[in-house]
Amino acid sequence: MIKEIKKGNTFVVRGATRVKLLEGELEVLGKDILPGKEDVPTDESESSEGIVIVPSALSFPLFATKNSKLEIFTSSDENIELVSENSIPLEWKKIKDNLIEKIKNYESTKPLKIMVLGISSGKTTLIKYLANNFIREGLQGGYLDSDLGQQILLPTTLMVGLIDKPFINLKEIGEEKRYFVGATFPKGNLKFIVSHYTNAMIEEFSKNHKNLKYILIDTDGWVKTEAGCVYKSYFVKKVDPDILIVFFDKEIEEYDKILSNAKERKDRNVILINEKNKYFYEKSKEERRFLRQSRFAQVFENFQKITIPLRDLIFIKRDYDTEKDEVIEVELGLKNLVSLPYHYVIVGLLDANSSLLNVALLFTVNIEKGYALIFTDLSYKEQRKIKKILLGSLRLSIKGNHQGYLYL
């Protein structure tokens, strides 16, 4: 269908939808969209000049900076809502302007750490908006995703990458480092492990990019309950952001404790977002589950069954030493492992230095014949680098369907 939109208005578009800009000019979360060529993206992770792909269960605001004409392909007219204003809240614009000034005046040799925290209130959307506007000002930075349940990237992992160009989809960020956790929720000691991993990734990434101006840190939505409060308070303390942006809700009492702990660092800038974004699309649990499953299915699509010899190979889990405040590796005996429901558990394939080679599904451990049967896409040369198998807790089918858990 062909749609026209006047300057100053917004189409809030839900997926799965493909939009082609025929005339005019749009802005999507700070990224400028201009009419482009006739080429078509091959999948939803790719973008082409003049084309915006909105994946299923997501929503993007297309703000018209000029009178524009669009060609829209979607399954239902209900996926398109016309808004007679810019759907980006004024509060976000003020935060953006404030942060740009802070980054430009920041004189430390280390990047400014900006963390966004809240309960599923548009954290990632805000980060995209900030990042694109920072790039517009010539400010290069990093993006770190600490949300294990992330739907666009690979769930059960943490990722850091370089922001050096405008983007809408997180897949467009150049991934540089990934840590495997093996769960979609930081239960138990994982809340400490995730905090340590996040801090380590920031330090390593900063060393590799000396001219980095900032790092945007995305977080999960676990705030409620005493455990959630402990997790977020520890996370903030360990990662130590310079600026903490909180989607605040006065009805959630855990925020008071988290903010009280965060303000113990006197020079930390804590920014509260009190205004609700009335155009924000809140994904349901079913939609989040569907997106995770779809992402797993995409990752597993090119996997195949391979066998690796058990000689010189150890199975491990990661744990947290409370006394030393450090993450440790614990070796798992094969006899104990095979007595557990380990089949189809997601694992991390590590080299001798415990660096992640890739993820895999563990099918079978045959002690008598001395091999493990796994599902992955590593080449033969890469397989020879495998020295450790780090067990996660999530059990999946080869299509990405949830099969249960492995409790170690």
Image (cartoon, rainbow, N blue to C red):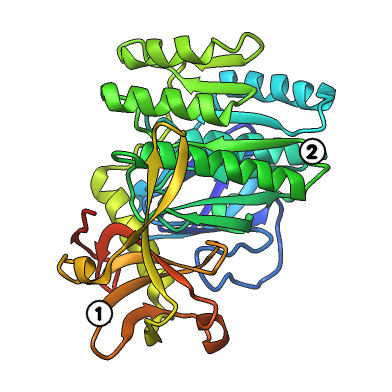
Q: How many marks?
A: 2
Q: Is residue 124 left or right of residue 68?
A: left
The answer to which of 365 and 22 lies nearer the viewer is: 365
The quadrant of the image that shows the C terminus is bottom left
Dot 1: element: strand
**In the rendered image, the vertical position of residue 131 relative to residue 75, given as above or below:** above
Q: Is residue 221 left or right of residue 129?
A: left
Spot occupied by residue 136 in the image (x, y as percentages of width and height): 77, 39
Q: Is residue 25 visible?
A: no
The answer to which of 234 and 387 lies nearer the viewer is: 387
Q: Is residue 196 visible?
A: yes
Residue visible at 70% across and 57% down in the picture: 35
Picture quadrant where residue 70 is located: bottom right
Label whose residue precedes the other's in the sequence (2 or 1):
2
The answer to which of 198 and 160 lies nearer the viewer is: 198
Name the residue carrying label 1: 364
Give the class, few, some or many, for how many residues have Cα within 10 Å of label 2's Cα (few <14, many ≥20): many
Residue visible at 79% across and 38% down in the picture: 139
Residue type, mark 1 in image: Thr
Spot occupied by residue 250 in the image (x, y as percentages of width and height): 36, 10
Residue visible at 53% across and 69% down in the picture: 351
Dot 2: element: loop
Spot occupied by residue 49 in the image (x, y as percentages of width and height): 69, 61
Residue type, mark 2 in image: Leu
Name the residue carrying label 2: 139
